[in-house]
Image: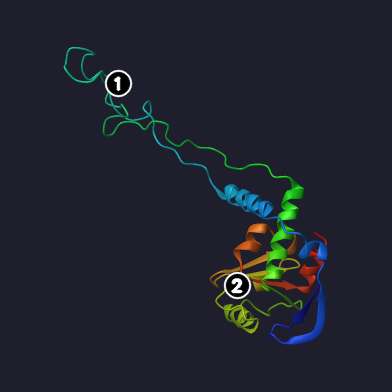
């Protein structure tokens, strides 16, 4: 599969980028994509939620009235869950939401996500570039030239580029990522993926 290569002005250079069919044209597995995105989001959770139970609520442990003979229901102390201000029954406790996913499943998910994006014509390839200085305006013009203005843009670089990163930092819905760190969630969450030639070389070997 081939895609046209553009420059940062959005002009077709006349050259073609070769996409590896084993990465960008596989038989996509929707369930693998679902599992990988689910794991990514689960790993982002802090899991620090906590509510106070009966033994943790501040209050006297004195029995409010005798067990029988009062004509009402049986009741213990003021921390009882059935009373206002009492503890909570089976409330949330701190926990770890992370779960294991096989490397081959994650690899299949990334390839499936890239296949979906190619099929939807949401991937473009640009020449390797950098900005002379960090300027948000430069990145906005770059996105506009590549018809990605107002979209969720994912720019994939071959490595770290401080000027490009700082230029995109204040742009809403723009994300900069290295080719080695690309993940299924980032791919599926965007609707305009821009790959540099250098990053494509890395992704073709996934």
Q: Secondary structure at mark 2?
A: helix
On the rendered structure, is 120 left or right of 2? left
The C terminus lies in which quarter of the figure?
A: bottom right
Residue ID at (72%, 72%)? 195
Report which residue position mark 2 lands on. Answer: 168
Look at the image and tell me whether residue 100 can be seen: yes
Q: Earlier in the sequence, mark 2 or mark 1?
A: 1
Residue 24 lies left or right of residue 39; in this view the side is right
| Quadrant holding the N terminus | bottom right
Label 1, secondary structure: give it. loop
Q: Residue 61's mark?
A: 1
Where does residue 60 sit, x and y in percent of width and height? 28, 23
Looking at the picture, how far across and down is residue 55, in whole percent?
A: 38, 25
Q: Is residue 123 above or below residue 146?
A: above
Asked if 61 appears above or below 23 in the picture, the reply is: above
Q: Residue at x 26, y 26 (%)?
A: 78
Where is residue 47 shown, x and y percent of the image?
52, 42
Q: Residue at x 74, y 54 (%)?
A: 108
Residue 2 sits in quarter: bottom right
Residue 36 vs 54, above or below: the answer is below
């Amino acid at each position: 599969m081939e895609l046209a290569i553009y420059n940062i002005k959005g002009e077709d250079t006349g050259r073609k980028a070769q996409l590896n069919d084993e990465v960008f044209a596989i038989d996509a597995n929707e369930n693998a994509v679902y599992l990988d995105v689910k794991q990514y989001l689960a790993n982002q959770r802090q899991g620090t939620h906590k509510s106070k139970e009966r033994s943790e609520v501040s209050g006297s442990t004195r029995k409010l009235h005798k067990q029988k003979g009062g004509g009402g229901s049986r009741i213990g102390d003021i921390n009882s869950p059935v009373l206002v201000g009492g503890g909570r029954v089976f409330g949330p406790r701190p926990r770890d939401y992370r779960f294991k996913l096989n490397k081959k499943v994650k690899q299949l998910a990334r390839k499936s996500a890239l296949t979906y994006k190619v099929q939807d014509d949401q991937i473009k390839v640009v020449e390797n570039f950098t900005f002379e200085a960090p300027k948000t305006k430069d990145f906005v013009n770059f996105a506009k030239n590549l018809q990605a203005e107002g979209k969720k843009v994912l720019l994939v670089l071959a490595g770290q580029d401080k000027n490009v990163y700082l230029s995109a930092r204040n742009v809403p819905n723009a994300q900069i990522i290295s080719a080695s760190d690309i993940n299924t969630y980032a791919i599926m969450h965007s609707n305009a993926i821009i790959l540099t030639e250098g990053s494509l070389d890395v992704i073709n070997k996934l």
